[in-house]
Image (cartoon, grey):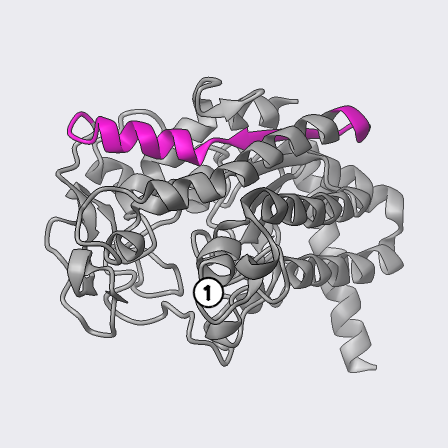
Amino acid sequence: MADELRIFSWTISFVVFLLVNVATCQDAGDGRMSLVPAMFIFGDSLIDNGNNNNLPSFAKANYFPYGIDFDGGPTGRFSNGYTMVDEIASLPPKVAVRFAYTSPAELLGLPLIPAHSQASSGDQMRFGVNYASAAAGILDNTGRNFVGRIPFNQQIQNFESTLDQITDNLGAPDVAQALAKCMFFVGMGSNDYLNNYLMPNYDTKNHYNAQQFANLLVQQYTQQLMRLYNLGARKFVIGGVGLMGCIPSILAQKNTNVCSEEVNQLVLPFSNNVKSMLSNLNVNLPGSKFIYIDIKNMFQDLLTNYRRYGFSVINRGCCGIGRNRGQITCLPMQTPCPNRDQYIFWDAFHPTEAVNILFARKAFNGGPDVVYPINIQQLASL
């Protein structure tokens, strides 16, 4: 009985908070205006903020020097500091000062979104939940080398379980009204290549060529996004995959510092399929709006014009071991580079906080060369 009362109290408070946020779109904890009532996040290690911490997993980042520039230290974020979705929600002012941003630090005007594994009350989930998990993929078997991880299907199921509790107690109309105004950020696909297709202990490449594998992924991806739509999501931000042939882990496999065109070409059909998928979903799902962040184009521009953006090191990680500091990723208590804001890559796979912030701001108010058909700020205003 006590547990039932606790769950009922939690669900009541969660939806009341959401409905209040929908009505006001303000007061994100310090009186700031928020552009959306909440943001729900699904993805992999690029945006995971601690969901793997308590899993029996090799894919963890809850140790120093991860989080060396994050207020509070290591949290499970795979970066020296803040992630892309942190910045899209709201970057703390002192971090904005560090990067000499004169425009407002907050973008959506939300506080940092809590990890699903760490949010136990309606108040904690008031402005959304982050379900992302390192090593997760579109396919359930992606990332099995890391043992514990939460695939995209399971992330959606976790979100669905939360909604089932809420809807049973408060009814579908109120929940639907709240969710329709919320932002849903999804960034999947990288691990399906790095920790599946390109892994020697997977036989995926023996069954699918590049186009066939891309077709398989996007077939699954379409069904997964439609599940979120059927659960009430309407405003979608889809993060594309980057130039995976240019990350330190891939560079370290060669004796040259040149990006692997083979890997970049392998992933290209997936990116093309995702763009076509989103165009179709925008047409066929009433009331929905899907936008695409072209991370590949952002990275191409950054690698070409890195000095203009204030970077000086583009081909090795700030923390790692071996060639390009990408053969073994950042180890516990390892001493990272001191000039982290001049590095594009933090470790063998992930960008630095400086890149995360740069890309988030481009996605928020950039043009159609990096985010389309509209940007996040325009999506929030719909």
On the image, the x and y values in percent for residue 299 come to 34, 34
Nearest the camera: 38 or 312? 312
Query: Quadrant location of residue 253?
Result: bottom left
- Count the marks: 1
Nearest the camera: 316 or 43? 316
Q: Residue at the location (69% across, 36% down)?
A: 22
| Residue at the limit of the structure toward the left, as seen here | 338
* Dot 1 alpha-carbon crowd within 10 angstroms: few under 14, some 14 to 19, many 20 or more: many
Q: Residue at the location (76% across, 24% down)?
A: 283
Would you say residue 292 sits in the magenta stretch?
yes
Horizontal side, residue 361 vs residue 249: left or right: right
On the image, the x and y values in percent for residue 7 come to 76, 69
Q: Secondary structure at mark 1?
A: loop
Would you say residue 37 sits in the magenta stretch?
no
The answer to whether any part of residue 358 appears in the image is: yes
Q: Residue at the location (49% across, 54% down)?
A: 193
Q: Quadrant of the C terminus?
A: top right
Label 1 amino acid?
A: Gly
On the image, the x and y values in percent for residue 178 come to 74, 40
Horizontal side, residue 291 vs residue 283: left or right: left
The answer to whether any part of residue 241 appears in the image is: no
Residue 272 versus residue 52 in the image, above or below: above
Query: Quadrant location of residue 361?
Result: top left
On the image, the x and y values in percent for residue 325 come to 19, 60
Nearest the camera: 318 or 14? 318
Q: Residue at the location (49% across, 25% down)?
A: 371
Q: Which residues are magenta?
A: 283-308
Q: Quadrant of the N terminus?
A: bottom right
Horizontal side, residue 254 vs residue 245: left or right: left
Query: Quadrant location of residue 194?
Result: bottom left
Nearest the camera: 37 or 27? 37
